[in-house]
Image (cartoon, rainbow, N blue to C red):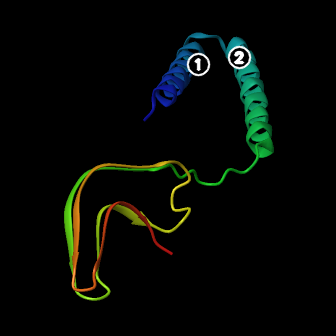
Amino acid sequence: MTRPQRITLTIALLVIAGLLIAFTTLKWDQANRLATVASLVVAVLSLGAAVFFGLRPAQSPRRGGITVRNSGNARATGAGSRATSGAAGAPGAASGPVEVSDSGDAEARDGGRGTSGWESRP
């Protein structure tokens, strides 16, 4: 749970606890007025939240960049084999920067293919 979520939850629980205490200690007339005002406030806040979230543009899921560190060595042996020490992906696989550091050795033999770092694959 994030810090703003914890703060919101704490405030909501304190308000609920305060209302419960008020309802148990007030006379019937006063408790009835308090309940009416509390209902009005909750209704207005709910309407505001519905309008706020309803008018926001839809957001696509965010994809970040790719970071690879200390990936180790890789070996490809044989025709058509691939060895990638680092990262490989289709063009556009990351919407952010691609960072590869301290990638290991990529060794290719007998028609294999080796990449140390980033390899763009269709």
The spot of residue 51 in percent (x, y) is 80, 39
Identity of the residue furthest to the bottom in this view: 79
Mark 1, Cα crowd under 10 Å, few <14 / some 14-19 / many 20+, is: some
In terms of depth relative to the viewer, which is nearer, 88 or 50? 88
Q: CA distance from mark 2 to mark 1?
A: 8 Å
In terms of depth relative to the viewer, which is nearer, 81 or 94? 81
The spot of residue 105 in percent (x, y) is 21, 61
Choose top left, top right, bottom left or bottom right for residue 38: top right
Q: Earlier in the sequence, mark 2 or mark 1?
A: 1
- Seen in the picture, residue 114 relative to 43 is either above or below; the reply is below
Mark 2, Cα crowd under 10 Å, few <14 / some 14-19 / many 20+, is: some
Question: Which label sits on residue 94?
Answer: none
- Seen in the picture, residue 99 relative to 118 is either above or below; the reply is above
- Residue at image position (67%, 16%) is 31
From the viewer's perspective, tell me whether residue 89 is left or right of residue 54. left
For the residue labelled by badge 1, is the local secondary structure a helix, a strand or a loop?
Answer: helix
Kind of residue at badge 2: Leu
Mark 1 — residue?
19
Mark 2 — residue?
34
Q: Are marks 2 and 1 in contact (CB under 8 Å)?
A: yes
In terms of depth relative to the viewer, which is nearer, 18 or 66? 66
- Residue at image position (46%, 72%) is 121
For the residue labelled by badge 2, is the local secondary structure a helix, a strand or a loop?
Answer: helix
The spot of residue 88 in percent (x, y) is 39, 65
Choose top left, top right, bottom left or bottom right for residue 77: bottom left
From the viewer's perspective, tell me whether residue 34 is left or right of residue 17. right
- Residue at image position (27%, 81%) is 112
Kind of residue at badge 1: Leu
